[in-house]
Amino acid sequence: MDELSKEVASQSSIVLGKAYDDVAHPALSSLGDTLSLVPRTVAVILGPWNKWVVNGENNIEEAIRQVDRKMGDVPEDCFCEPAPNVVVPAIQQLSYSYDSQDLRDLYVNLLASSMDKRVSYLVHPSFVSIIGQLTPDEAKMMSFLSKEPGKDHIPVIDLRVVEDDDMPIKARWRLLCENYTNVFDAIVQCPENVSLYLNNLERLKLLSGETYCYEGEDDYLGIEDSERIRNIKKDITPSDGWRFDCVHHVFRLTPFGKLFIKCCV
């Protein structure tokens, strides 16, 4: 960067640093003071959270350095001051994320986007609270979707036992496994929770569950033949007149989810 770019980058760091001093530092000090006053038993229980004070503070300082590095590639005429309703709560919530690099990366990317006028107008204030409601595994899932070209959908199945009649729509059925997919098994820490993660991402309007499937039928074959589905079928024997049935459907990125990826992922 030339000298002017460095100066703008430095001023941007000052903006973040000031928000840190105004918001996070008093909160960190306050927690330390509070822990020194609580009864002994409670203090023992809360003792491990003392590290939040030190780690949270270091986490914010490292995030500011990461934002500064990211802004190194931004043209000098594209710098802008971030909106207070984005930068202040983002820095405040950063202090709670010291144990997750995946969540920290989302906050850092959001802060960098809010300081680049080419994309700052796309930054929605709710992105801060959305990140605060994500698990590290859900952050990994959104990152996976952002890196796969054209990957805006997740094939999922519901495994059921249904009455084996000739009716196209089954009146009697029992659900065995809902919203199951093995798409994320290799990237998340808890694959058994993926269906819950999908529900949460849908609740946050980042994904939308749709009852009809998409054209990639081969993707469903890999899910139906997965180890988990085979184990469920092995442990359950349908009653006479009943059979296993897989319902295909899909989760898709919403326009809001794509915007979140652009600004935060």
Image (spheres, helix red, strand yellow):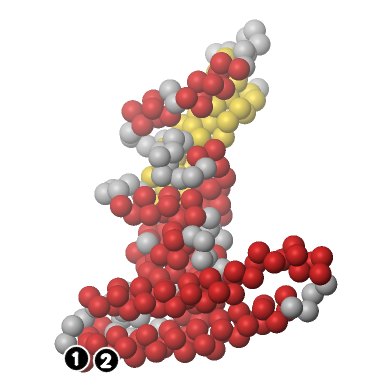
Asked where in the image residue 72 lies, by quadrant, the reply is: bottom left
Q: Residue 3 shows which numbered tag?
A: 1
Residue type indicated by callout 1 = Glu
Looking at the image, can residue 194 be seen?
no
Residue at (63, 9) in percent of width and height: 241
Residue found at x 66% / y 64%: 48
Q: Are marks 2 and 1 in contact (CB under 8 Å)?
A: yes
The x, y position of residue 119, in whole percent, is 32, 74
Percent across and percent down for residue 109 are: 37, 69
Which quadrant is the N terminus positioned in? Answer: bottom left
Task: Tell me: residue 178, above or below residue 103.
Answer: above
Q: In the structure shown, which secondary structural element does the residue marked by tag 2 occupy?
A: helix
| Residue that mark 2 sits on | 7
Question: Which sits in the foreground, 1 or 235?
Answer: 1
Residue kind at label 2, given as amino acid type: Glu
Residue 199, image x and y in percent? 55, 48
